[in-house]
Image: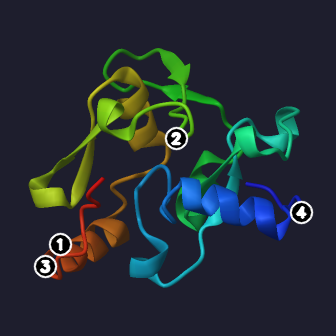
Amino acid sequence: MSSAYVPRELRQRVAEQARHRCGYCQSSEDVVGLAMEIDHLFPRALGGATEETNLWLACAACNASKGHRISAQDPQRGRAVRLFNPREQSWAEHFEWVDSGVRVSGRTAIGRAAVRALRLNRSLLVRARRVWVEAGLHPPVD
């Protein structure tokens, strides 16, 4: 979570690379009707730079849940792992849609840690996903 100034051109490039979706919960700007925030993958508070290779999109809720963390505990194994990096890692490798696309499940330690730490199945988002699924707007097709 950061208030660092990100030039418009850079924000637009990052948004296009992220397909205008949150890198974590996969919510789309077009579906939620709100612009995503710029997430510093390696937080500024820990020395992360405001440069393209360190930026991705995140919804406000995922960005707030992530905060300044770079790791979280895998609930299955009880050990800390690096948080999912949507710029460098494949979402489908670490996560899958379950319950007809309304919930996210972690496939790996990284995925499980992110689901828990970022609250990817928070109740309001799950309720919204049900509506999106019924409308044919979710889950995203890559």
For residue 121, what is the image quadrant?
bottom left
Where does the image place residue 26, in percent across and percent down from the top left? 40, 57
Q: Earlier in the sequence, mark 2 or mark 4?
A: 4
Neighbourhood count class around disc 2 (C-alpha, 10 Å): few under 14, some 14–19, many 20 upward:
some
At x 73% / y 40%, what residue is drawn? 54
Neighbourhood count class around disc 1 (C-alpha, 10 Å): few under 14, some 14–19, many 20 upward:
some
CA distance for labels 4 and 1: 35 Å
Where does the image place residue 77, in percent across and percent down from the top left? 35, 15
In-front residue for pair 140/123: 140
Vertical relation: 66 (above or below) 79: below
Neighbourhood count class around disc 4 (C-alpha, 10 Å): few under 14, some 14–19, many 20 upward:
few
Which residue in the structure is indicated by mark 1? Answer: 133
At x 24% / y 68%, what residue is drawn? 138
Helix, strand or loop under label 3: helix
CA distance for labels 1 and 2: 23 Å
Which residue in the structure is indicated by mark 2? Answer: 86
Q: Earlier in the sequence, mark 4 or mark 1?
A: 4
Where does the image place residue 70, in percent across and percent down from the top left? 65, 31
Which residue in the structure is indicated by mark 3? Answer: 134
